[in-house]
Amino acid sequence: MDALRPADSEAGILANVGNTDFLQAVSLFHTRERRREAEVAGKEGKELPAVTGNRQALLGLPLAAYKKYEKQVEDGFMKAAKFLHMLHIYRIYDLPYQSQIVPLAAILADVGDAWEHEANRAKLVRWYWNGVFGELYGSAVETRIARDFIEVPLWLKGGVEPSTVSETIFRADRLKTMRMRLSAAYKGVNALLMKEGAQDFRSGQKFDHTVFFGENVDIHHIFPQDWCKKQGVKPEVFDSIINKTPLSFRTNRIIGGVAPSTYLAKLIKGDAANPPIDPAKLDVYLRSHLTDPAKLFADDFAGFMEDRQRQLLALIEQAMGKAAYGGTVPEEGEDVETSEAEMTISS
């Protein structure tokens, strides 16, 4: 796992995977095997043992079953790290759901090298982002994990879509309420922007490289907080993910609390520590964050928010493989890490 370790981290993306997570994945294989044996024996309905990784199943896991699936499951977790890196998720800090690693690893362990085929990989990516943007892995996840372990491999073999994909709907107005750094969907947007090729406003470096190799990068405001407050914009508006993007620490210091037109002019002009940036190149950097440069140079906050919400929504729809819900039924609740999208069938 050391080889999968970003330079700025004490441990790789799997560092928080504990013994319980590993046993849970093994238990999924063991209980599925028992269920298949029961089916061969002619049992049906409630007579069939459940496929599960719950606490009771872990406590009853035989040593022989552990030894049988240990290597396969370990390989699945290593493939899960590779899969997450492919999605430009390198740090635990940026991982949307720790709990989603268990079904991901179990699925990859089950399907083996088949996950590397383009069509299968595309399906797995779609499943993963539906779990993230459907906010399905925040709480009460045991049933969801077992269901995905059963349904996703069958889907890869030509079966029906798993419920995590077919039942999930992303609300268009959800972007306006994504404000917490701990939110899974918030982290998901950040990862999608990195995968899209977002480049730092100052250096032009792509963030997949800067994050992996340990540079100080985080999500910062595009229209700075101080400027927004002076314009009378409320925090619940300017703090949403629509007004945030990954930036390096040094770039964010240059931005400060001034209007976009002011800090962009500063970047173009340069100073003793930073060479001037060609306006055409800066335009490319800004567009790589799905922002309209003209609206930033005009300090058009309202126009910027509307345009960027549209572009971010298109990015999420592409990742999920479906259109967002744009109806008028108001969203309930706040941006909490443990919330589930209310327009899904519960597990």
Image (spheres, rainbow, N blue to C red):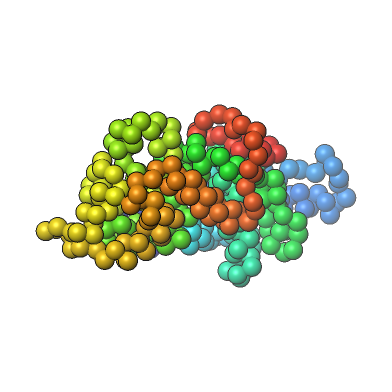
Residue 215 location, x and y as percent?
A: 28, 55
Up-down relation of residue 341 to residue 205 (above or below):
above
Locate residue 50, reporting x and y percent.
73, 43
User: Is residue 20 rendered to the left or right of residue 60?
Assistant: left
Asked whether residue 318 appears in the rendered view, the answer is yes
Residue found at x 70% / y 39%: 345
Q: Residue furthest top?
A: 333
Residue 16, relative to residue 234: is it above or below? below
Q: Residue at x 18, y 59 (%)?
A: 270
* Nearer-the-camera pick, 226 or 90: 226
Residue 152 appears in which quarter of the rendering?
A: bottom right
| In this picture, residue 201 sits left or right of residue 154 | left
How far across and down, in percent of the image, does residue 68 sit?
A: 61, 57
Q: Quadrant of residue 105?
A: bottom right
Residue 325 x %, y %: 64, 44
Image mark count? 0
Residue 66 or 91: which is nearer the viewer?
91
Q: Nearer the viewer, residue 175 or 89?
A: 175
Q: Report whether residue 64 is seen.
A: no
